[in-house]
Image: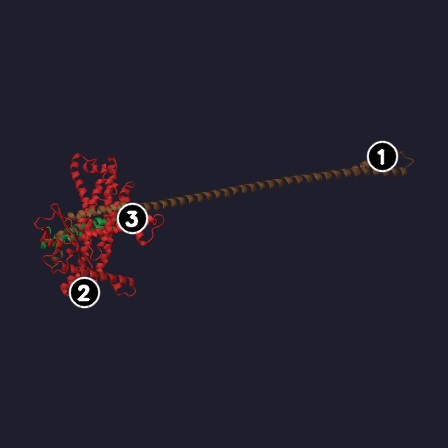
Chain colours: A green, B brown, C red
Amino acid sequence: MELGLLAAGIGAGIIAIGAGIGIGMIGKGAVESIARQPEASGDIRGAMILTAAFIEGVALIGAIICILLALGVGG
Amino acid sequence: MMMSLFLAGSSLLSFNTGFAIWILISLIVFLGIMYKFALPPIIKGIEEREQSIQSSLDAAEKALREAEKISKDNEEVVREAERTAQSIRKEATKEVEEFRAERMEKAKEEAEKLIEDAKKSIDQEKQKALQELRKEVTDLTIEATTRLLQKNVDSETNRKLIDETINDLSKN
Amino acid sequence: MFRHVFVSQSLSPLKVAFVTLLVLFGSFGVGLSASATGVANASDADAAETEESSSPIDVMGKIADHDYIESPFGKVYLPRIFWVDGQFYTYSSTKKALTSGDFIEKEGVIYRADETPITIDLSITSHLVYVWLGFILALLISLWAASRYRRGIGRTSAPKGALHNIYEILYLFIRDDVIQGYIPKEKAPRYTPLLFSMFMAIAFMNLFGLLPWAATATADLTVTATLAFVTFIVTQASGTKTYWGHIFNFPGVPLLVKFILTPVEILGLFTKPLALCFRLFANMLSGKIMIISILGLIFIFTELFGATVGIGSSVIWVSLTAVLYGLKVFVALLQAYIFTLLSAVFIGGALEEHHHEEHDVEHDDVKVMDPINA
């Protein structure tokens, strides 16, 4: 149980790093694209939110696994 | 103590078949009502409005294009009229110019002719007058001479002589 | 920002809103503590009622499915319907089922008196109630809008009123940006009602989770899995020859690669809706857990450091929750949008038809974003 909590904590941290890098890169790309082409900002914003949601989905799946670990469901 | 926060977690990822059946049934009923009663009027209504907006937009565009065409036609007509007026004016000016020149020419000619005539008649009158004068002078001279030399001089010979003299005179 | 609002006297509407939120969350907290004491109740079939009933809050109890719905006036127990070995049993509540003697409870699981496990538990649960509420609200609003369109408002004139306008904006957004953007235009009208209905239902289910006492139906894996299952079925049903060809007989690759590619493609068939269902589930669940946990910190602090610290620190937690609530409203709508969008992407991908020789060229600019690799 203790190890499960430890694993969940470390896992959550790694998820945060991964999702942070991913969303940061999306934000970077989106801002650069908007700066280059301000007239396409609407489309870019839509694509940005969509991609961020994908990353968020993956991160949340990881988060759920962390919760399961913390609960000791995996044994 | 924190552990107690996550106690019932084992049910978190469980799949409940009975629940799923309920949801599926409700979803089918929901979709059925949506398909049958709720959405068709909405879809049709929005489409109708879109079409009417589109058609009115098209009509407006058409009207605009027509108005543009009419105004262009009008402009063309105005320009044509202007062009015609211009040419008419030009022609008129030209004609007037020609007419004036012609009249000037004619007047000049007439004037010259008049002057010529006048000169001619003056000359004639002058000649006539001279002739008359000469004749008068001759007659007067003859008479005078005759009166003076009635006896000794043959009038015929004298007349000849005097005429010669007068002729010489007039020549000088 | 919130401190400013709290101190300032001039911003009266904001202040009123803040106080309202405070009261709302305060009552939420009361509900929480009430449920914490209720956890020990033996009639709770699903909730954790064993070990530590002294716990100040019960996060999972808030999230898990129950045999009752919470209301400001107390719990309302829901009927239980069991199907055991081809026989139906219906009771108005769990207590009735247990007192009737036909069913017994063992370690939180209900068995028939002869200890045969329940085949299918068709009980009406709290999440099912909120699924229904989501459906009913979506239906009511749609029927209301339909009656307006039938009367000519919106058909011949512009829509009137905020609700009608919002409804139409949502419909046009889903139809033009989501569906027609990913499904070929000539086939899009066939899927518009389905996807729009799904969007409305999911959005309302998500938004219901924002109410205190209410449960988030979409924070239940069964609900999202069923919704994703519908998308899966529709996707496969509308699959073209090209689509199936790409799964079982990928064009333009050697035979040996096909042996590897086909299982991968078949796996992809199932991972797509699985990711769809997990994404919605995890997003809604995490939002719920976060808010309950942060509000629960008030009670944890009270237990650890005394009532003064607990109540004093509640200003921080409540304002944090208020911010999170704003985020949750956005996420609720965003996730409904993403679910609809991905459904449209999958269906559009299945509907795609192009010639094999053009495949390599076209595959680069196909609008399908693979959520698995994303």
Q: Quadrant of the N terminus of chain C?
A: bottom left
Q: Give, as a three-letter code, the residue at label 2.
A: Ile
> How much space separates mark 3 and mark 1, taking CA atoms?
146 Å
In this rendering, the answer to whether B106 lies above or below C299 is above
Q: Residues within 10 Å of mark 2 (few under 14, many from 20)?
A: some
Quarter location, residue C264: top left
Q: Which residue sits furthest left? A: C114
Rendered location of residue B169, percent (x, y)? 80, 38
Q: Is residue C198 left or right of residue B123?
A: left
Mark 1 lies on a secondary structure that is helix
Subunit of label 3: C
Q: Residue at x 85, y 33 (%)?
A: B160
Nearer mark to the viewer, of 3 and 1: 3
Quarter location, residue B101: top right
What residue would you read off at disc 2?
Answer: C311
Quarter location, residue B127: top right
Which sits in the foreground, C241 or B84?
Answer: C241
The answer to whether dots 3 and 1 both sit on one chain is no
Q: Is residue B160 left or right of residue B99?
A: right
Rendered location of residue B92, percent (x, y)? 58, 41
Q: Residues within 10 Å of mark 3 (few under 14, many from 20)?
A: many
What residue would you read off at disc 1?
Answer: B161
Q: Give, as a three-letter code, the residue at label 3.
A: Tyr
What residue would you read off at disc 3?
Answer: C171
Q: Do the numbered discs 3 and 1 sit on residues whose CB atoms are within 8 Å? A: no
> How much space separates mark 2 and mark 1, taking CA atoms?
175 Å
